[in-house]
Image (tube, rainbow, N blue to C red):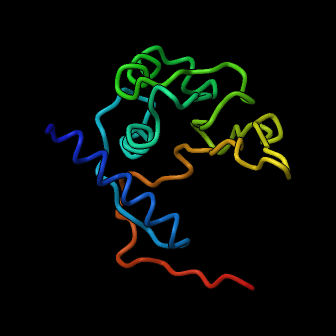
Amino acid sequence: MSELVFQTQDTFRALMDATARPGTIRMLQGAHAPPPLMPATAAVISSLADYETPLWLDAGFSDAPAVLDWIRFTAGAHIVEDPREAAFALISSARVLPDFGVFAQGSEEYPGPTVQRRGHLAVRAGGQGHRRPRRRELAR
């Protein structure tokens, strides 16, 4: 097996662990990808997206042909223009967040078709990071 397969599996486990333990910080080994895609964001996309996962990209990513080619080749993901069709939204900057109302919201009867928003704001790449995991107390 290639190193990419093991890296993708490690990233997936880290994402599931972080999801199960809110407030816990997990380090990701970044994937090589063209700018403006950051290595940790690329690792998340490599782990979560595939040919059955429609992705919506904001202008910061969709205007970068190398990013489109990388996502299509690496993940085989279908890139959609209508955000309501997306399973994941890849957002390049917190400064230009789209209105989340444009994405699939699900319903009371069928809550499944909601979009997961991922982007540089969802992962931290580079820098010194934190020396120990942060824990947040959640109000009940």
Above or below — where is 122 with respect to 18? Answer: above
Q: Nearer the viewer, residue 83 or 94?
A: 83
Left/right placement of residue 23 relative to residue 111 reads left
Q: Horizontal and vertical percent for residue 122? A: 54, 52
Q: Residue furthest left?
A: 1
Q: Which quadrant: the N terminus?
A: top left
Q: Which quadrant: the C terminus?
A: bottom right
Q: Horizontal and vertical percent for residue 29? A: 28, 51
Q: Nearer the viewer, residue 71 or 38?
A: 71
Left/right placement of residue 72 relative to residue 81 reads left
Above or below — where is 117 with respect to 84? Answer: below
Left/right placement of residue 116 relative to residue 8 reads right
Above or below — where is 65 with respect to 26? Answer: above
Q: Nearer the viewer, residue 25 or 7?
A: 7
Q: Horizontal and vertical percent for residue 128? A: 34, 63
User: Residue drawn 58% across and 28% down?
Assistant: 54
Q: Horizontal and vertical percent for residue 109? A: 84, 50
Q: Nearer the viewer, residue 126 or 87?
A: 87
User: Residue drawn 45% across and 60% down?
Assistant: 16
Q: Residue furthest front?
A: 109
Above or below — where is 122 with respect to 48? Answer: below
User: Residue drawn 63% across and 20% down?
Assistant: 80
Looking at the rendered structure, the number of numbered marks drawn on it comes to 0
User: Residue drawn 29% across and 54% down?
Assistant: 10
